[in-house]
Amino acid sequence: MSDPGVSGRFGEFGGRYVPEALVSACEDLEAAYRDARSDPSFTQQLDHLLSVYAGRPTPVTPANRLSEELGVHLLLKREDLAHTGSHKINNVLGQGLLAQRMGKKRLLAETGAGQHGVATATIGALLGLDVVVYMGEADIQRQALNVFRMELLGATVVPVTSGTRTLKDACSEALRQWVTQVDEAHYCIGSTMGPHPYPWMVREFQRVIGTEARAQCAGLLRQGVPDVVTACVGGGSNAAGTFAGFVDTPARLVGVEAAGGAAMTDGLPGILHGFYSNILQDEDGQVREAHSISAGLDYPGIGPEHAGLSTSGRAEYVTANDEEVVSAVVRLARAEGILPALESAHALAWIIRAAESGEIPYGSTVLMTLSGRGDKDAEQLRRLV
Ligand SMILES: *Cc1c(COP(=O)(O)O)cnc(C)c1O
């Protein structure tokens, strides 16, 4: 998981499939990011805010009671304890500082469930940047509370009425809007997707998860490195950041997608939102909607680096269904007093299944990134448990 170079390819995946007007914007962004990451004043400022604002490092918690039940040694990387309740803040803080350094006045963002929108609105407020969030009209209706949170934080939420009025349409609209205002606006993409340099840059901003976890595991485990490292996968940013810390170890790397939105398992190679990767599509190549219990995993594509890691065999991608996800939430809540986000519970659902079937051998050590807290899902869970 190194620098994908100027072409931005992970094997055959990735690239930069954007309208002419955005090519130079992507090139400028790449140059600015390369310059920033090698500038100690930028990295120090980012590390400082990750610490005093976002609350890093997040701990690794041994899940003792659940470990005993499952016959594995389960460790949880606690991104739920980061400010705003998930890993999304790591990426948005990095991109916000970069936008400021590039002299941009405004952040544009897409959001589905509203979590990336809230994180962007938060960082806009912190850094004094205007924030405009594009959100499908259907999602605006479903996520009224998050719309209000964004507005409380000073952001403008713009309804997107094209297509199915959901996340993929919001992404398309944000890209279109960026074309018209590249000089003053930065498009703050929320996951390891989009045209180069985004998938690489977002993974690098999330690498802090894997770097911290690697050092924390070294202190907690006799053999230093867990046998299995796993995380849920929507666009793939929390998983990519986690895997980056362990890709050079013998650990088995497992990404868990939602069964109803499994771009790696059920998708075919194609181009969406500026990059080439596995995409859910019908026989005519039209993008299929993803549907799962967790809005944060309902993206019809997957980050190109994951498609590359799957092709090379270095990482595996599996799925978890809605039902086992809900029972995983309840199980973690009652065994450990931690209420995970529905997204994060996909990784736990796979661990439970694999430990019980013996696919993960008895006594194995398993590190799971708990990408976010479940408070946001309480209303939805109330109707299900
Ligand atoms: C957004 C989100 C995800 C999915 O995004 P990735 O880019 O795949 O990490 C997972 N968990 C939580 C809590 C989220 O908010």
Image (cartoon, rainbow, N blue to C red):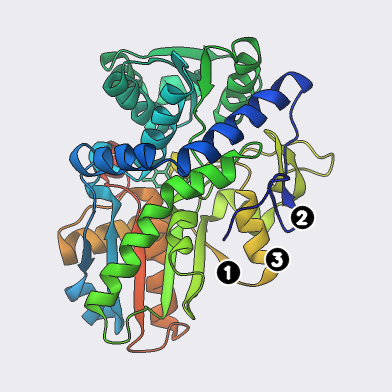
- The image quarter in which residue 62 lies: bottom left
Q: Residue at x 70, y 48 (%)?
A: 277
Mark-to-mark CA distance, 3 and 1: 9 Å
Identify the mark nearer the N-term, 3 or 1: 3
- Mark 1 residue element: strand
Indicate the quadrant of ligand 1 in the picture: top left
In this rendering, the answer to whether 194 lies above or below 345 is: above
Q: Which residue is mark 1?
A: 316
Identify the mark nearer the N-term, 2 or 3: 2
| Residues at discs 2 and 3 in contact (Cβ within 8 Å) | yes
Task: Judge: label 1 CB < 8 Å from ligand 1.
Answer: no
Identify the mark nearer the N-term, 2 or 1: 2
Q: Is residue 16 left or right of residue 74?
A: right
Q: Which residue is mark 2?
A: 12
User: Which one is nearer the viewer's eye here, 355 or 249?
Assistant: 249
Q: State the quadrant of the N terminus.
A: bottom right
Instruction: Give x and y (percent) for residue 263.
Output: 64, 51
- Mark 3 residue element: helix
In this rendering, the answer to whether 73 lies above or below 267 is: below
Q: Is residue 264 left or right of residue 258?
A: right
Q: Nearer the viewer, mark 2 or mark 3?
A: 2
Q: Which residue is mark 3?
A: 311
Q: Residue at x 31, y 14 (%)?
A: 151
| Residues at discs 3 and 1 in contact (Cβ within 8 Å) | no
- Mark 2 residue element: loop
Amino acid type at image mark 3: Thr
